[in-house]
Image (cartoon, rainbow, N blue to C red):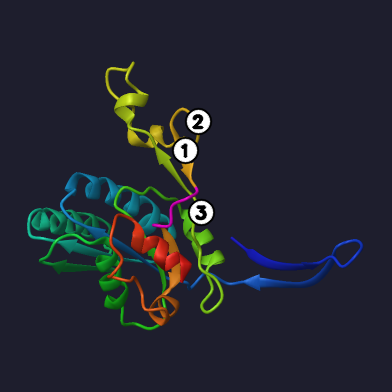
Amino acid sequence: MEYRHVTLFRPFGPLMKVKNEMIDITRSVINIIVPLAERTEAFAQFMQNFRDVCIHQDKRIHLTVVYFGKEGLSKVKSILESVTSESNFHNYTLVSLNEEFNRGRGLNVGARAWDKGEVLMFFCDVDIYFSAEFLNSCRLNAEPGKKVFYPVVFSLYNPAIVYANQDIPPPVEQQLVHKKDSGFWRDFGFGMTCQYQSDFLTIGGFDMEVKGWGGEDVHLYRK
């Protein structure tokens, strides 16, 4: 797929095209960083989507999982090994921290675990579903030293409530619809972001002194 960046200028009349340039994202690797503690069933679902989108379609992805604690760690290793062996995919890093879960700490550690030069990072939670098109949006909307990308996430309501009149909820894939009855656009959330490692490190990453749920995300956004 071909992408172009068009710059338009409108002084006091018709639009004037100032610049039209090709954008090459074919070599842009994304390091998807997922902080995790327990939640092995959610991780198994995440890896199904990861396999379909990242391994089979995009093919320019590195996965970094930062796992907190010991309980469930062996299961997470087993899920990773199963998916990667089936797909002959080895571009992943599993970092184990024997401490209480802290999302900001996990993302800080995951960002610094990459030592292969500049890389675009996507901070992602285990219950997030994304498409190959989103990954290209991530590449197109982040630029080192200039731009970071904060996508607006669609948050689904509890399927047990949405589909209460059915014997069992439909498969997850059928629940992923953008409509008023199934969820809402979370335009006030800053947890998911695409940004380059150099920019993240330059501003000092997450502030571990910030307390409270989600506070570190807002603080990073304001930086």
The magenta segment is: 187-191
Q: Which residue type does callout 1 highlight?
A: Phe
Comparing 140 with 2, the one in front is 140
**Percent x, y for residue 218?**
41, 61
| Mark 2 residue element | loop
**Percent x, y for residue 38?**
15, 52
Main SS of the magenta part reads loop
- Per the rendering, the mark at residue 133 is 3
Q: Which residue is mark 2?
A: 180
Q: Which residue type does callout 2 highlight?
A: Lys
Q: Are marks 1 and 3 in contact (CB under 8 Å)?
A: no
Q: Quadrant of the N terminus?
A: bottom right
Question: Which residue shows up at 33% across the image and 32% down it?
Answer: 158
Separation of residues labelled 1 and 2 (CA atoms): 6 Å
Taking 92 as reference, is 168 above or below it?
Answer: above
Residue 48 left/right relative to 195: left
Residue 66 left/right relative to 116: left
| Mark 3 residue element | helix
> Magenta includes 188?
yes
